[in-house]
Amino acid sequence: MARTEPTAVADRAEAGKDDLAGLEAGLDALETVQSGRTPFSRTFREKIFPPLVAIVVVLAVWQALVSFKIVDDPTKLPAPSAVWDEVQNAWLQGTLLEYIWTSVSRGLLGFLFALAIGTPLGLLVARVKFVRAAIGPILSGLQSLPSVAWVPPAVLWLGLNNSMMYAVILLGAVPSIANGLVSGVDQVPPLFLRAGRTLGATGVRGLWHIVLPAALPGYLAGLKQGWAFSWRSLMAAEIIASSPDLGIGLGQLLENGRNASSMPMVFLAILLILIVGIVIDLLIFSPLERRVLRGRGLLVKN
């Protein structure tokens, strides 16, 4: 028995070393996966090829509905070639990029204004109990209010100009950004706050170094939703409010197609609105989201 006990202790110690070595190997592998660059072939197979297949399938079904006369009224469903002809005409006339830039520039600038207002407002609501009790329910109510409801009063208040467009964007996006930040702050573990106070991170320093980094995932979700509200609010404003001084954006292009009973123009406007939304998400919000998740160890594979 005297010899057996030391042997058992030695075996347990050896097993512990093996477990520790396995854990270190796993952590090394995790770091290698995170830091390694994904081959283009894998990126193409997993991220580029599936959307291309989906687009081809949609176009094939669309063309089949027209070719087999399942929908034989071009005023209801134009052929893909008719929409492509509309794209070519707009490009040759030099108006295609103008339509896109008019709306994108308004949308991004309005979103930046909403970001500058919604971020401090969200922090104020999240950290001050009286402010939360006073305006927290109002922000939630405003978030559920359709953005198109703000267009008539904005026109009456500000007239048919870009200020009206920006006002509609702000009223649609600020509540989403503020509520997203409030949700992110509410999910910060109390241990982080106590550790920050112990290290002297209080007040503005605590907000900057502890609260905001910990609340970043919820804040980013609010930003994505805020952009969606900004874009939808802008389209609603452009559809309803038209003036030569405002130029022709994608929403106004959609309305012009309806007034002219031109379904190719209507489909062109819808596709451009959809494409812009997808591109903004792929170029701005998706990389930010991946970076935040990867920094927290929540995203191993690209």
Image: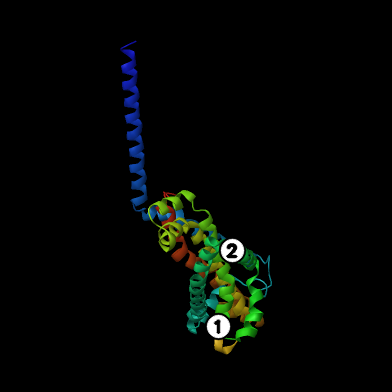
Residues at marks 1 and 2, CA–CA distance in whole angstroms: 32 Å
Q: Nearer the viewer, residue 67 or 282?
A: 282
Q: Is residue 202 left or right of residue 157?
A: left
Question: In this figure, which residue is indicated by the disc labeled 2?
Answer: 130
Question: In this figure, which residue is indicated by the disc labeled 1?
Answer: 163
Numbered disc total: 2
Q: Nearer the viewer, residue 288 or 56?
A: 288
Mark 2 residue element? helix
**In percent of the image, x 33 and y 13: which residue is there?**
4
Mark 1 or 2: in front is 2
Q: Position of residue 249 (x, y in %)?
A: 55, 80
Q: Amino acid at mark 1?
A: Ser
Q: Quadrant of residue 259?
A: bottom right
Q: Mark 1 and mark 2 in contact? Answer it, CB < 8 Å.
A: no
> Which quarter of the image is occupied by the N terminus?
top left
Name the colouring of the figure: rainbow
Q: Quadrant of residue 261?
A: bottom right
Q: Amino acid at mark 2?
A: Phe
Lower position in the chain sequence, tag 1 or tag 2: 2
Q: Position of residue 138 (x, y in %)?
A: 63, 67
